[in-house]
Image (spheres, rainbow, N blue to C red):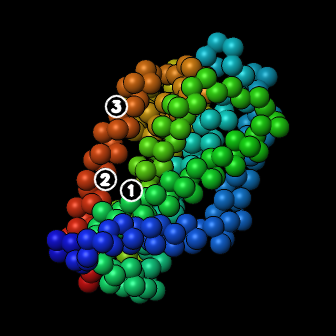
């Protein structure tokens, strides 16, 4: 299937705006579940780990552990919720059968991709901002390079949003989608340096961490706050950029074929 459907030139991107609005409204209508709940979970992580480790651990020389932890928790919450937004929306639409109402209008596969991933990025940014605002009364967090923070936040949301689209297309049941979340997204996120600097790991596990693309998203994001990171932020940016390009290409190819959507 080369394209979702032909449509007049004058209506270009109307479908994108409509579908983006629908996807944003979908998670915003249940904001306590999709935004507030992950913010609460991240703050509980912050309170527990800071209570146990803040007096015993410093990172990058003089940064307290609680301060170090905040950017990691923000990015972890952002990534997980960006993935959840696209994947849950697609699998629900496929199982209930209402995906046909998205496929029938004259929307190109590029608009489809941009709308779903754009909504995932927005949900990730809402959750990440919520975690930051909730953490500010508890700990002072510097922000040395705001543009790096924003750049990695947007790129991370786009990557996990794309992965969510792929998972939502490939999965046919909720338990198959849960397998993506529990056996791929969760381990890669938790082992990416959210709770520690990889310099504290043995050499073998440092090498393993360097093979995890999630590590570069979180390490580059953390550089934006502290001006320090485990690897060069330019190296992180290169890995994140390549990962996004590859995932976007794969996702667009699946959408262009209508794989597990049209039938």
Quadrant where the C terminus lies?
A: bottom left
**In this picture, residue 187 sits left or right of residue 129:** left
According to the picture, the residue beneath numbered tag 3 turns out to be 238
Residue closest to the eye, 172 or 256: 256
Mark 2 / mark 1, whichever is N-terminal = 1
Separation (CA) of disc 2 from disc 1: 6 Å
Identify the residue at the far left of this view: 2
Q: Residue at x 71, y 58 (%)?
A: 36
Quadrant where the N terminus lies?
A: bottom left
Residue 92: % across, % down = 48, 78
The answer to whether mark 2 and mark 3 are in CB contact below 8 A is no
Q: Secondary structure at mark 1?
A: helix
Mark 2 / mark 3, whichever is N-terminal = 3
Mark 3 / mark 1, whichever is N-terminal = 1
**In this picture, residue 205 sits left or right of residue 13:** right
According to the picture, the residue beneath numbered tag 2 turns out to be 248
Q: Is residue 174 visible?
A: no
Q: Is residue 143 visible?
A: yes
Separation (CA) of disc 2 from disc 3: 15 Å
How many marks are shown on the rendered structure? Answer: 3
According to the picture, the residue beneath numbered tag 1 turns out to be 162
Separation (CA) of disc 3 from disc 1: 18 Å
Residue 14: % across, % down = 39, 71
**In this picture, residue 48 sits left or right of residue 227:** right
Q: Residue 25 falls in which quadrant of the image?
A: bottom right
Q: Secondary structure at mark 3?
A: helix
Q: Residue at x 33, y 42 (%)?
A: 243
């Amino acid at each position: 299937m080369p394209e979702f459907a032909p449509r007049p030139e004058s209506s270009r991107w109307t479908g994108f705006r409509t579908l983006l609005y629908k996807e944003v409204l979908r998670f915003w209508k249940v904001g306590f579940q999709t935004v507030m709940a992950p913010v609460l979970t991240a703050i509980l992580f912050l309170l527990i780990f800071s209570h146990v480790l803040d007096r015993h651990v410093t990172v990058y020389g003089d940064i307290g552990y609680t301060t170090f932890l905040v950017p990691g928790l923000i990015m972890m919450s952002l990534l997980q919720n960006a993935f959840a937004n696209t994947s849950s929306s697609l699998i629900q639409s496929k199982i209930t059968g209402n995906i046909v109402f998205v496929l029938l209008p004259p929307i190109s596969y590029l608009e489809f991709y941009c709308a779903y991933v754009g909504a995932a990025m927005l949900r990730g940014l809402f959750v990440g901002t919520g975690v930051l605002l909730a953490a500010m009364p508890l700990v002072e967090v510097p922000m040395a390079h705001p543009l790096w923070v924003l750049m990695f936040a947007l790129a991370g949301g786009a990557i996990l949003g794309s992965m969510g689209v792929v998972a939502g297309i490939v999965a046919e049941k909720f338990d198959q989608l849960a397998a993506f979340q529990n056996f791929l997204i969760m381990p890669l996120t938790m082992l990416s340096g959210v709770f520690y600097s990889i310099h504290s790991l043995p050499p073998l596990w440092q090498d393993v961490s360097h093979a995890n693309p999630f590590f570069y998203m979180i390490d580059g994001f953390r550089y934006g706050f502290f001006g320090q990171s485990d690897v060069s932020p330019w190296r992180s940016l290169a890995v994140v950029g390549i990962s996004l390009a590859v995932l976007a290409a794969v996702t667009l190819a699946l959408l262009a074929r209508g794989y597990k959507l049209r039938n």
